[in-house]
């Protein structure tokens, strides 16, 4: 579909302080906007960033029909721009939309729109190590009506914001055995706003106790780990990589999938399997070398330096030679173009995007 272009006369990236900023506070100069009504997508445009105007009756404000994605653009070592795993994020966006009874975003709108937006905002993509442009596609229900039913009107948008390291240091986490992030049959596998809103209260309680995040456990028994905060979970126990399987209650993370592929090609021992709290406790108490970390688009690899389980503190290994850092370095090399893109994960942007 046609995407109209309305651009600002001057990009303000030169006024942005890349040395000191808070993630997610400052948007770039433009936004992609598309509207859905009468059973089809009616219009799409890239335009200067501006505030939204929605009716107090907009259904997104009342009934939770909101879905989002998160992906990144990078400046590669040769100066080209690339978007990491654009195809997979497009697939996951529509999987979430389907679960929330919302219309799919057309492939051309999602992919071409994001590529054009990133190309337009390329001055916001720093070539400094660890920096990227975070891209947030999202959709909200906008029909003006109170009534518990599926909306007939939607707004799809994409905003961008500069990003450096999400976590500055290893995390202290608490295993949560009372509150639940998601249950089977629910929407835990979809990136919808309700999942994150419901997590605030227990996460805030943990932060008041001195923790950075929680590790969620299964809703049925609270005996198996699932996710940590907004990240997938991984462990390396005596050199073997372990991670819970995705499914109804665990989001199919793109970073998780990428790291598993890299670990497999490195020849690591690895297993995707349920991980019980008892298994973790026994590994720590037996003196095994345990690395524990969250993985996600924003955090990439976030090491845990402390895990509290039932009031007992355990201390995963976070030394400089930890294997998790090898995974992060390898992933960074693939995204930056320092290594050949053997997985076809990078979508090149702009005039140099020939292939």
Image (cartoon, rainbow, N blue to C red):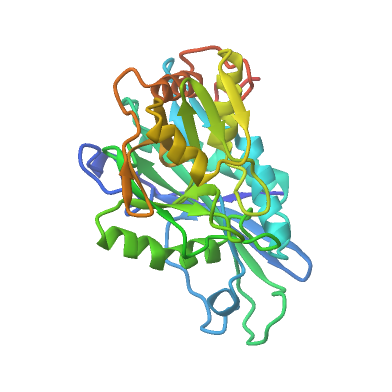
**Can the viewer see residue 345 in this picture?**
yes
Which of the 4 image quadrants contains residue 254? top right
* Residue 106 position (above or below residue 143): above
Q: Which residue is drawn at the image coordinates 58% and 60% (left, top)? A: 219
User: In this orientation, which residue lies closer to the viewer: 346 or 171?
Assistant: 171
* Residue 120 position (above or below residue 61): above
**Left or right: 170 in relation to 81:** left
Residue 123 pos. (x, y %): 37, 35
Which of the 4 image quadrants contains residue 222? bottom right
Residue 97 pos. (x, y %): 68, 58
User: In this orientation, which residue lies closer to the viewer: 196 or 22?
Assistant: 196
**Left or right: 119 in relation to 187:** left
**Left or right: 80 in relation to 11:** right
- Taking the view exactly as shown, the residue that stands out farthest to the bottom is 146
Count of numbered circles on the image: 0
Q: Which residue is drawn at the image coordinates 50% and 35% (left, top)? A: 234
- Taking the view exactly as shown, the residue that stands out farthest to the right is 39
Quarter of the image with the C terminus in it:
top right
Residue 229 pos. (x, y %): 44, 52
* Residue 344 position (above or below residue 217): above
* Residue 181 position (above or below residue 233): below
Residue 120 pos. (x, y %): 47, 39
User: In this orientation, which residue lies closer to the viewer: 145 or 186?
Assistant: 186
**Can the viewer see residue 348 in this picture?**
no
């Amino acid at each position: 579909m046609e995407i109209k272009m309305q651009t600002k006369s001057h990009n303000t990236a030169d006024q942005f302080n890349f040395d000191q900023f808070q993630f997610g506070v400052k948007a770039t100069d433009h936004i992609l906007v598309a509207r859905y009504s009468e059973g089809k997508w009616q219009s799409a445009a890239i335009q200067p960033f501006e505030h939204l105007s929605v009716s107090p009756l907009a259904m997104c404000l009342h009934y939770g029909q909101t879905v989002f994605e998160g992906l990144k653009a990078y400046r590669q070592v040769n100066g080209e721009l690339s978007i990491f795993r654009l195809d997979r994020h497009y697939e996951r966006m529509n999987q979430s939309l389907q679960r929330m009874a919302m219309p799919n975003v057309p492939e051309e709108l999602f992919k071409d729109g994001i590529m054009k937006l990133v190309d337009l905002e390329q001055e916001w993509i720093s070539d400094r190590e660890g920096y990227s442009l975070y891209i947030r596609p999202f959709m909200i229900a906008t029909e003006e009506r109170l009534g518990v039913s599926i909306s007939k009107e939607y707004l799809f948008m994409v905003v961008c914001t500069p990003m450096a390291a999400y976590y500055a240091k290893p995390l202290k986490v608490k295993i949560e055995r009372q509150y639940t992030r998601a249950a089977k049959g629910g929407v835990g596998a979809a990136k919808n706003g309700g999942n994150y809103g419901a997590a605030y209260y227990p996460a805030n309680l943990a932060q008041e106790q001195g923790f950075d995040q929680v590790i969620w456990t299964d809703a049925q028994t609270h005996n198996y780990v699932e996710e940590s905060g907004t990240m997938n979970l991984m462990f390396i126990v005596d050199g073997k990589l372990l991670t819970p399987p995705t499914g109804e209650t665990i989001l199919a993370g793109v970073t998780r999938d990428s790291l598993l592929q890299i670990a497999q090609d490195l020849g690591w021992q690895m297993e995707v399997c349920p991980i019980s709290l008892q298994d973790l406790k026994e590994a720590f108490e037996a003196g095994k070398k345990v690395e524990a970390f969250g993985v996600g688009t924003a955090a990439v690899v976030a090491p845990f330096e402390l895990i509290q389980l039932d009031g007992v503190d355990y201390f995963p290994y976070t030394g400089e030679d930890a294997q998790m850092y090898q995974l992060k370095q390898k992933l960074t090399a693939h995204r930056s173009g320092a290594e050949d893109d053997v997985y076809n994960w990078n979508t090149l942007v702009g005039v140099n995007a020939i292939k």
